[in-house]
Amino acid sequence: MAKHVVATTEEIPAGGRKLVEVSGRAIVIFNLSGEFFALLNRCPHEGGSLCKGYQTGLVESGEPGEYRYSRRGEIIRCPWHAWEFDIRTGQSRCDPQRMKVRSYAASVMPGAQLLEEVPAATTFPVRVEGEYVLIEM
Amino acid sequence: MNNVAATPSLDKTAVQATENGPVDCDIHTRVRTIADLKPYLSTQWWNYLKTYGMRARHGFAKAPPFPKAQPNAARRDAWPPDGGFPATNLEFMRAQHLDHYGIAYGIMNPLVATGQGDQNDDLSAALATATNDWQLDTFVNPEPRLRASVVVPYEDGLASAAEIRRRAGDRRFAQVLMMSRTAEPAGKRRYWPIYEAAAEAGLPVGNHVFGYSGWAGTSSGWSSFYIEEMTDHAVSCQSLVTSLIMEGVFERFPGLKIVLIESGFGWMPALGWRLDRAWERMRDEVPHLRMPPSAYLRKHFWVSTQPIEEPERPEHLLDTVDWVGPDRIMFASDYPHWDFDDPRLALPSALGLERKRAILSGNARALYNLV
Amino acid sequence: MSMADAPEALHSGNWTMSETQGAIDCDVHPTITGTRVLAPYLDGFWRDSLAERGIDSLDSISYPVDAPLTARADWRDATGTAAQSVEQLSGQVLDRWGHRTAILNCLYGVQLVFNEDMGVAFTRAVNDWIAREWLDRDSRLRASIVVPMQNIEHAVDEIDRCAADPRFVQILLLASGEMPLGRRACWPIYAAAQRHGLPIGIHAGSAYRHPVTSIGWPSYYIEDYASQSQAFQSQVGSLICEGVFAKFPDLKVVLLESGVTWLPSFLWRLSKFWRGLRTEVPWVDRSPMEIVRDHIRLTVQPLDAPDDPSVVRRIIDHMRSDDMLLYASDYPHWHFDGDRTLPPGIPADLLQKIQVENPLATYQRL
């Protein structure tokens, strides 16, 4: 596995997302309150492009009539059939064990450290003062 | 962590099968605003429309009775960059859908502002004619891959027949369009002028889900949720099919062909078996039927694929395809709606190349007389 | 082909009576020929009202009295009526066919009246008539509680009243009533059912509060009868989507005379939509297919299928559970000739389950 720089942290504000391509794969990067997550951009159902989907919260229920809403913005719904995926884990809500979208480890690294540790990580332009999102694949 | 196994991939037959260009039997182009119809309406009707509006057989002036799951029931990615509604921008639709999938022909089934099922039959008739003219000017004339449907004010059988006759012979129209939830079951005689004119014109009648019958959504009253309404379209479709058969519509109009659009097709074998069993006991009630009900089903009905049923075991759907008849099933995308089916991925891969080709293209080309 | 020769083989469909000996018959129908039959079980005011107001009949068009399906010709007596006495019913179902028990589901049109109080009076009378003139006279018989759906509170009262008699083994509802059965207004009935350990039996038929179909009134009776499978589909959708089984995890629902084969494809569609529409009904926490396998059962007569055993086997495979089918003759409704109570094509290897094990698992009181 290798680390790839995919974005500056600046270009993906909290609640935002960015579509990138790494090794021929379309990956969508999310920023949840400063934490970054990376998912393959293809819905496992019929291949819808997740980066075009709606970002919403988690709806759970203990009994009919109860709507327990939490984790606003942490669920991405496929733009087509609206399947819900947990941005943090890639798991679907409808079948968490068997239906997932591939997720990739994402991390943040300051430019200076990046230039030292992973000099050939990417063709992405890296500056010492910057802060960067990396994914591992 | 096996999370990629479910990622659909384009198997070889899927790609091959779409090489000749799929025929998409259900595309929902629409007006940008109601003003798009103004050029096709009289001053009287335009003023009426602005003042009193359309009034379906439900209470909402602008919204559907069961709110959709996504705005306008559309795919999130189908909103064109010009800010208009999905499927209003031909250029965007070409890029995202027609060109993207190499669609050879697309049949349009307009749903918005068509006036079908409006409480006012005369407004319904005016809007139907307007919608038909609008389809030609806006989409069919500039885009040779598209075909229109003859929208009719179906609650008025005679006015509908007149509209069909007005369009008969115009090959830009592929079929007549009705909605599935009519004020009475579809086989009732008040609708026969529609079938007569359609059969005369050599046009299939496409029966698309929705419409507002004025009755509760089920035989036991109103359900609560959109998911129930969506599922119940397959249910009301069974009632309409039963009516068409039992009323003897196909004895009276032996050339009539019916396309059931967006109700799926999984229900069809069980309905055929049920009707045959009932007919074994009660055929004396319907002596005008000269063959078992399932024979009429097999002879006069076609179904579109979308929303394609998803059994836990995909091979179970193959049984259904065999029982319905692979020659009866026609691909539909339902573009730009959220429950859209991708032509390369929606069909079970085990169908094999030949059946896929028939479903994606051959059956529709034959039914709609597309070269 | 006998079961001993090829236990795995598909049955030819020509069942002999020996193969249905000892079966539990989950759906038979006693006939009420007129309100006068119930008169002894009504209090003075209602009894006299029958005569004073000329209330003679609550016959429902769900089963027109002389229609062929309503009663097989050779089961009708000299008056043209079938199953109006214990002798007729037990003689045929229990003695001749050797069924160990039969569950009586009375379909007399007491659900059709609009007056709540009249509804209470008539349903009490029906249940008392069943207890005195049927259950008391043949200890092999069991029955469902008929409830006055005109008023849910009264329905619960009637359930509580009749549940005290252990020979009542189910609560009987019709496939089409005032509102979809999943709606919360109906829940006190399910609470009572769960409390007493009674399944809900939903039987084909209607109270005709709404047209026969969601698209209005058809012309023919054959359409009314055929449309029952549609009524069941909507009801299954309602029960699941409203979360009845989430709220009442011990509840079992039996679909009586539904036709069966509509179920798998209906669930394919509902479950497909659920995967994307889950947030509208977030208490539906697993696929509707799983919920149905746990909570819903279906009687096998009639079975809407061709005679071909290989097709029947495929459909049963589509249901993905051997636990769901319950044996029933549906006597005296006419679905078969002679003594062939089992639909053709039912696999031999499922016989014991369908006839005994599944009914015992469903009806705790048996």
Image (spheres, coloured by chain):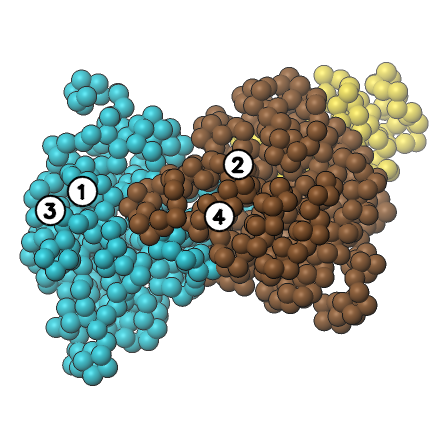
Q: Pointer 4 and pointer 3: residues touching (CB < 8 Å)?
A: no
Q: How much space separates mark 2 and mark 1, taking CA atoms?
A: 35 Å
Crowding at dot 2, Cα within 10 Å, few <14 / some 14-19 / many 20+, comes out as many
Corner quadrant of residue C126: bottom left
Tell me the tag on residue C24.
1
Pair 4/3: label in front? 4
Which residue does the image show at 21% across and 73% down from the upper left?
C56
Task: Give the residue pinned by disc 3.
Answer: C92
Q: Point out residue A61 in the picture as x, y percentages from the top left corner.
A: 52, 51
Circles 3, 1 touching at the beta carbon (< 8 Å): no
Same chain for the residues at labels 1 and 4, yes or no?
no
Q: Colour of chain A?
A: yellow
Q: Residues within 10 Å of mark 4 (few under 14, many from 20)?
A: few
Query: Hey, what amino acid is under mark 2?
Result: Glu
Q: Which residue is mark 2?
A: B309
The reply to whether the C-beta atoms of the residues labelled 2 and 1 are less than 8 Å apart is no
Q: Is residue C338 left or right of residue B74?
A: left
Q: Earlier in the sequence, mark 3 or mark 1?
A: 1
First in sequence: mark 2 or mark 4?
A: 4
Q: Secondary structure at mark 4?
A: helix
State the residue at coordinates (64%, 67%): B120
Task: Give the colour in which the image draws chain C.
Answer: cyan
Distance Cα–Cα, label 1 vs label 4: 47 Å
Which secondary structure, mark 2? loop
Which of label 2 and label 3 is nearer to you?
3
Of tags 3 and 1, the one toward the viewer is 3
Residue B252's mark? 4
| Mark 2 touches mark 4? (CB < 8 Å) | no
Task: Give me the C-alpha separation between circle 2 and circle 4.
Answer: 33 Å
Q: Nearer the viewer, residue B111 or B46?
A: B46
Amino acid identity at mark 3: Gln
